[in-house]
Image: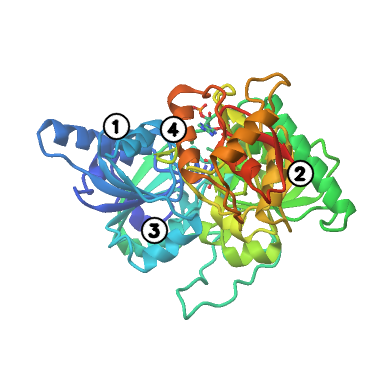
Amino acid sequence: MQDRIRHAGMHDRLMSAEQAAALIGPGMTVAMSGFTGAGYPKSVPQALAARMDAAAAAGAPFRIKVLTGASTAPELDGALARANGMELRLPYQSDPVLRERINNGEIDYIDMHLSHVAQHTWSGFFGNIDLAVIEVAGILEDGRLIPSSSVGNNKTWLDQADQIILEVNAFQPAGLEGMHDIYYGTALPPDRKPIPLTAPDERIGEPYLHVDPAKVVAVVRTDAPDRNSPFSAPDEASREIAGHLLDFFDHEIQRGRLPGKLLPLQSGVGNIANAVLAALSEGGYEGLTAYTEVIQDGMLNLIRNGVIKMASATSFSLSAAGVKEFNDNIDFYRTRILLRTQEISNHPELIRRLGVIAMNGMIEADIYGNVNSTHIAGSKVMNGIGGSGDFARNGSLSVFMSPSTAKSGSISGIVPMVSHVDHTEHDTMIIVTDQGLADLRGLAPKQRAQLIIDRCAPRLPPHAPGLLRPRQARELRQAHPPPPRRVPLLARQACRNRQHAHATGPPPNRLNPITQHLNNGRNSQYQVLSMDGVGIVSFRK
Ligand code: 0RQ
């Protein structure tokens, strides 16, 4: 095969990962490639972590600020976090070691919309970008770069960083060349122009990234695969969620609110999202499109079997089996997949114009439709908001999905009040759990609450101890004279219930603040029927 490094001058800058890592100094702001475990640098971060370990052992801690596209992998986030070498990380992560350090307060973490990262960098909010470490699949004779398995923020990093280290990864298939569409027309206000993209399969840029060769201080050869985490086989809850969603799509097509080929699909990360995609292949669809961030195994299968004719994204996130399928059939996929910068894959203007159907996982939703995608019990981050906000706010349909309970049924996914808000009730249109689907469009808060509880909340067996009896309800009415409210909520009690649930599992037969409030309301529309240990389960008009 032709050498991946075709620019003569770049050969002079070839060096080992250790030599390249020595160019990074304490306190630097370093931007790295990588998005959902794809296209991240594989060797320089590990060599840097070794330096950090040595520095710490010598009593001189060595820490840097790290910016990426999204999550990376053990060789980057894991290695630098283990070496305690990060003082700041943004904008999305999913590494267990890094997560622990963030949640222990040892690393500052800026969790932000992925579409905002480039513009905030240009505006200088993260300070000067001292250096960028970018994985590429090759370097052309003229110095342009063949992007790797993700694009993410690489255009911005190459443009904004003072110095560049390139990792040229021979493991990435040469057939990636031509699969990218890098648009160079974005700007800060007031110089913005409409982005000329009206369908997911349109090309508006070019297949290569630009770099000023004078800024390239090191070129490192690597030959290593991406993270390639396996996906769990869809479980019963995921299949039920997928079934409800497909029924809903059918209903919307029959009502004329969705075309037969749906609208461009966005699918988030995680096992549930992957399971929904798997189910779509049995839904009788063909010729669909995707305008999304990440191509997971489920989407690759849909492209393979013609259900999706074309997908636009910024990255892959494949299992080892998915990578093999992709690499073995790359000529087929090259005409059906376009990888763009995350500025474009997540651009609000484009998501709104295309009418994207946004489908994302969540940790919990409250009965009014506020959604927590990121924080367990309000304070421990799981991954980050990623692109879910870009898509949910601007899509024509914003769907959030989760099993109705977590941790073996001990924590309700539907709660009185979310412990952290990522997506407000104003952005949330559809909530789906294994129990059912609530279409919140056109509903006022108390109507939303009734529907979410009726359709989505976990169910109790008929004689469960949480059943609220009429006498108890009467007593409660006397105990808590109710103020009429637009959004009934006893916030203090909602928080107390949650703390208890997370500390000890489901609390014993305790009255839920919302059920109390709704039941107590002189002008309440609802009568409480039952409740679970964590949040209310059902009430009726
Ligand atoms: O924990 O791994 O310890 O078992 O959260 O939950 O049910 O496996 O669901 O893999 O689909 O992820 C929201 C995290 C869901 C994901 C989230 C625990 C649960 C498990 C994972 P364990 P599941 P998924 C585009 C879109 C934000 C970013 C986004 C996410 C773990 O979808 O990161 O959407 N979204 N980006 O046990 C306590 C609860 C819980 C809970 C779940 N209520 N309480 N723990 N868990 N609910 C892509 C990008 O932006 C890049």
Q: Is mark 4 within 8 Å of ligand 1?
A: no
| Residue 277: quadrant of the picture | top right
Viewer-nearest of discs 1 and 3:
1
How far apart marks 2 and 3 lie (CA) works out to 55 Å
Q: Secondary structure at mark 4?
A: helix
Q: Secondary structure at mark 2?
A: loop
Residue under circle 1? Answer: 82
Asked if 233 appears above or below 315 in the picture, the reply is: above
Please rate how many residues cluster around mark 3, counting C-alpha atoms within 10 Å: few if below 14, some from 14 to 19, many from 20. many
Residue farthest left in this picture: 59
Viewer-nearest of discs 1 and 2:
2
The residue type indicated by label 3 comes to Trp
Please rate how many residues cluster around mark 4, counting C-alpha atoms within 10 Å: few if below 14, some from 14 to 19, many from 20. some
How far apart marks 1 and 2 lie (CA) works out to 54 Å
State the residue at coordinates (24%, 33%).
50
In this orientation, does residue 22 appear? yes
Residue under circle 3? Answer: 157
State the residue at coordinates (43%, 35%).
223
How far apart marks 3 and 4 lie (CA) works out to 42 Å
State the residue at coordinates (78%, 35%).
243
Residue under circle 4? Answer: 499
| Location of residue 271 in the rendering, given as x and y in whole percent from the top left corner | 61, 33
Of label 2 and label 3, which has the lower sequence position? 3
The residue type indicated by label 1 comes to Arg
In this orientation, does residue 180 appear? no
Please rate how many residues cluster around mark 1, counting C-alpha atoms within 10 Å: few if below 14, some from 14 to 19, many from 20. some
- Contact (Cβ within 8 Å) of mark 2 with mark 3: no
The residue type indicated by label 2 comes to Lys
| Location of residue 187 in the rendering, given as x and y in whole percent from the top left corner | 47, 73
Q: Is mark 1 within 8 Å of ligand 1?
A: no
Q: Nearer the viewer, residue 417 or 340?
A: 417
